[in-house]
Image (cartoon, grey):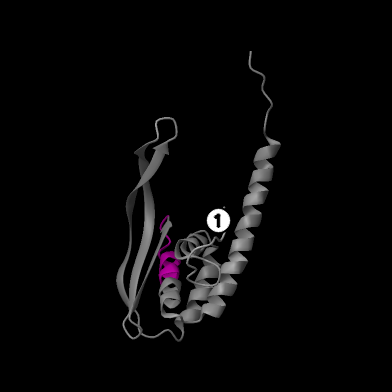
Amino acid sequence: MIEPGAGDPVIGRYRHGEALGIFAASRPDAIKSCAEEVLADLGEVSVLANRTGLAMLPFTDTVRNTAFHLGEVLVAEAHIRVPGRGVEGYGAVTGRDLEHAMAIAVLDAAIAAGHRTDAITVFLDGEWRRQQEDDRERLRKVEATRVEMETF
């Protein structure tokens, strides 16, 4: 669960990494709609990258505290530049949804430009609350399957 924390907030109460995490876990239709709204008057956008590919998935062995690669994961990524505002945006999500990655990149660039931050903050707040509720519901379902075991 992402809990907005202290530090240097980039937008509203969210740091840059927190905002990107919320965007990546957001509902695809919702973030695409928000990005379309923001994109309408953002200015000319140059697409630097818009592709899918495999990325190594790092994991840490908690016993030995050593890092290793668990495997590969399919990732969609987008990198854009907004020349008129002198900013860039980047977005990546697991899977092959290039439009979702592009929506994240658009919102990332808009945040960097200070453009439509009110609408983006409303979106972040709503998605953060929804993700928190989804996590609580998932944990309730997991807890329902917990079995008490005795060791001999």
Instruction: State the quadrant of the C terminus.
Output: top right
Question: Would residue 92 appear left or right of 151 to someone viewing this image?
Answer: left
Asked if 150 appears above or below 76 in the picture, the reply is: above
The three-letter amino acid code for the residue at tag 1 is Ile
* Front in this rendered view, residue 35 or 65: 65
Question: Residue at 51% of width from left, 78% of height from top?
Answer: 117
Q: How crowded is mark 1: few (under 14 residues within 10 Å), some or many (20 or more)?
A: few
Question: Residue at 45% of width from left, 61% of height from top?
Answer: 17
For disc 1, the marked residue is 2
The quadrant holding residue 103 is: bottom left
* Residue 117 covered by magenta stretch: no
* Residue 94 x, y percent position in the rendering: 43, 54
* Residue 99 covered by magenta stretch: yes
Q: Is mark 1 on a helix, strand or loop?
A: loop
Asked if 28 appears above or below 140 in the picture, the reply is: below
The quadrant holding residue 42 is: bottom left
Question: Residue at 56% of width from left, 79% of height from top?
Answer: 118
* Residue 73 x, y percent position in the rendering: 38, 48
* Residue 136 x, y percent position in the rendering: 66, 50
Q: Main secondary structure of the magenta part?
A: helix
* Residue 149 x, y percent position in the rendering: 66, 22
Asked if 8 appears above or below 59 in the picture, the reply is: below
Question: Would residue 92 appear left or right of 120 to someone viewing this image?
Answer: left
Question: Residue at 45% of width from left, 73% of height from top?
Answer: 107
Magenta region, residue range:
95-105
Name of the residue lying farthest toward the front: 7
Please tell me how many numbered marks the rendered image carries.
Answer: 1
Question: Would residue 79 appear left or right of 140 to someone viewing this image?
Answer: left
Name of the residue lying farthest toward the top: 152
